[in-house]
Every structure is written in C-alpha cells, then in structure tokens.
Amino acid sequence: MGSRNERRHQNLVPLAALISREMRSEKVEKPTLRYGNAAQSRKGEDYFMIRTDCQRIQGNPSSTFSVFAIFDGHNGNAAAIYSKDHLLNHVLGALPRGLGQDEWLQALPRALVAGFVKTDKEFQSRGETSGTTVTFVIIDGWTVTVASVGDSRCILDTQGGAVSVLTVDHRLEENVEERQRVTASGGEVGRLSIFGGAEVGPLRCWPGGLCLSRSIGDMDVGEFIVPIPYVKQVKLSSAGGRLIIASDGIWDALDSEMTAKSCRGLPAELAARQVVKEALRTRGLKDDTTCIVVDIIPPDNSPQPLPTPKKQNKLRALLFRKRSHDSANKLSKKLSAVGIVEELFEEGSAMLAERLGNDDSSSQSTTGLFICAICQVDLAPSEGISVHAGSIFSMSSKPWQGPFLCADCRDKKDAMEGKRPSGVKVA
Ligand SMILES: [Zn+2]
C-alpha cells in the first residue's frame, strides 16, 4: 500500500504542493531583522531577552535563528531571572538533533511545551516563591513561533494595517475556559474581599491570589496554575511585518490596534520607545512597562509586492492556507484578517497528553534508551510511563506507546490536572 502511494505521489504533484513550492522559492532569501527595546521600571520585575546569534546546527551560520522574549515577574524576580537564564536551553534540549529547517520548525511547538514545563519544574525544586509570565518568540527565516504563559502579549502588524494577536491572555478575569479548568482542577476563583465583605479587583485564584491562570513558578499558588504555553506558528508573506512584544504595563494602557498605530512608520528602536511613552502618557507608570519591537524586513533585492486593498482580498482567498489540524481554533478569524500570513500551527490546551502527542519517534535516545519527553533524562526499560496511560485520551492511543515521562514528570502532570494535591510545598 505504502509503496503504491509513494509512486503515485512521485508522478502527480498536487496543486497545493506546487503553490507551496512556488511560495517557498519566492522566499529563499532570509529577511533582515531590525529591533529595539524600551522599558520603564517600577517594581524591577520585568526582564527581557534578545538573542540573534542562535544556530540550529552549531557552526553553520545559514541555520541562524533569533529569540526575543519578555518575562514579567511577580512576587519577586527569581522566576523571571531563572526563566531568562534557562528556558532557551531547555527548549533546544527537547529538539531532536540533525533536523532540517522544516522538520525543526515542525518539532518546535512540542519542544516549547517540554521546555516550559521543565523550566517550571526545576525552578520549583529550588523552593523559592515568585512566578513569571513568559512570551517567547522564535524567528527563523519567515516563520515566527510564539509560546506564551500569562498576559505579556505579542502582536503582529502587517502591511495594509492588519493587526493580529499571536498570544492568548491567560487572565482569570477574561478567560472563561481557563477559569473552568482551574476550578475543575481544585482551585478557587474569586475576587479579593475587603473589610465589610465588598469584593474588589480582578478575579483571582485562591490560595495565592494570582490573577493569571498560567505562569512559570508560583509553587505556593497551586499546580493548576500550569506552565503549559499557548503556541502559535505563522509564516509571513514576503512583505514581512512588525512584531510588538510587551508586558501588561503596555496592554493595560493601550489595546493592540492603538499600540501598532502609535509607532507605525518609525524604525524599530524609536518605535519601542514611542510605545512605552504612549502607554505612560495614557496611564502613568503604574507597573513595570517593557516593550520589544522587531521588524521582519524583506531583503533589498527582492521585489516588494504592494497590493492595493482590493487585490489583497483576492490574494487572501488564494494564499491564506491553514495547515493546523487542531480542533479548537478560536483565533483563525482574527488571523485571516491579516491577509497573506500563513498559519502553520496553533494549540492552547493545558493537557500535557494532548500537547506531547502520539509521535514517539523522538522518545528514543541515540543509545536506544527511552527518554523523558519533559526533562530528557534516560529511562530504564521498566521506568517510563506513557504520557497517555490512564488519561481519557488513552482510548484513541496505546498506553504502551510514547512519548514517555519519568516518575517525577508523571507526578507533575497529575498535579497539573488536579489528580493529586501539589506535592512540593514552599518551606
Ligand atoms: Zn522527566
């Protein structure tokens, strides 16, 4: 069966493949990145990271990719600093070696999930309080992959003025789905009661009183505040675009449209400063306020398509193809407004079994041993527990199939799903 299908594929190239080949050949050349950042500190708990020298294959400059990230800490800065120092390595450590660019990008969403959970687990093992939001942006060629927990938003401004949000705000106040998940996992959601019983402020999770439903750290709040990121991956058109990544100090003052509009036409360095200035003008300095602007610019010699709005509508119908196959796709409407940005992946589930999937090709190390999909330790043959064992998803998959988790990570998974009370407690 397999060989017959393969032969058929060799003879007949589907139209979709042709179009995608054409699009790819248009974009062989990498875009140029221009970026800038600005910040105003009030509590000293916002951190950011800019790395433009990462390589998929060590020593190969053509495999260079960039990382831009914001960490907005709360209850101290330890979790933000720890994540800034370790998250990238944990994500890269979860990627199989020797992948080509396409495979690498395909493996990235899962590696991001593993890297976020590992970072959370290792930070918690240090016994320190504090937590942090993370918005982690990886740019490889024309493909932008964003993973986020918390409410540090990342927006994309493309030609023609279409603004789309590449993150989801994990705020209990605004996210009904997350509220239900936290409650079902044993958390209590309510407002702060002041003297006299009056309720004030946004919805918070108790114990702890956190307004966010996802973060890294926060071990004193409860394991149902999970570190599993919302991940979105898009491929820009050869016209490029502008990313604006910022902490809630910006988003509490300005909405996405206002933010994009406030700095259009300015180079990235000035744009970041302008966004912070605009937020302070609107709301004053009430919180740490950090902003990174990244312009993804077509290489000089490539023809720059400047479609009129009418033509762009036609192009949208032709070129906006969606390859994501996940069920709950709430943002597709917003994104289709962007025009010819291609959505490659979107998933926001808080269930580890769903996020690590069924593919067990990466669960075997080079030595032939199985490895934990989260912390990447070698597992003895009797030690690994399938991520699907005992879960409601085991109906459709085989519990003896990977990916596998070590006993520690399996405990962590159960705790996040509310199947056991949080194991580790702050002394
Ligand atoms: Zn593990």
Image (cartoon, rainbow, N blue to C red):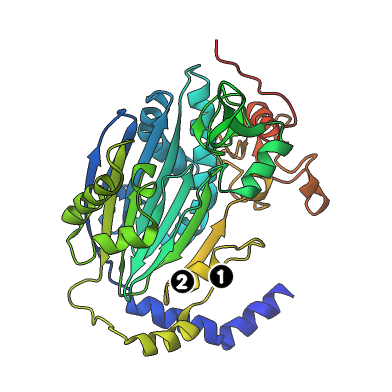
* Count of number-bearing discs: 2
- According to the picture, the residue beneath numbered tag 1 turns out to be 323
33, above or below 194, in the image = below
Q: Which image quarter: residue 425?
A: top right
Sequence-first disc among 2 and 1: 1
Q: Is residue 50 left or right of residue 393?
A: left
Relative to residue 332, is residue 273 depicted above or below?
A: above
- Quarter of the rendering containing residue 172: top right
Q: Which residue carries the number 2 mark?
A: 342
Residue 175 position in % (x across, y down): 59, 48
Q: Which quadrant: the C terminus?
A: top right
Identify the residue at horizontal 25%, vertical 71% (top origin): 298
Secondary structure, mark 1, is: loop
Residue 214 in view in this figure: yes
Going by the numbered disc 1, the residue's amino acid type is Arg
Quarter of the image where the N terminus is located: bottom right
Disc 2 is placed on an element classified as strand
Q: Amino acid at mark 2?
A: Glu
Tell which of 16 and 133 is nearer to you. 133
Position in image of residue 90 (x %, y %): 45, 37
Residue that appears at 55% across and 59% down: 346
The reply to whether the C-beta atoms of the residues labelled 2 and 1 are less than 8 Å apart is yes
Q: What residue occupies the far top of the structure in this picture?
A: 427
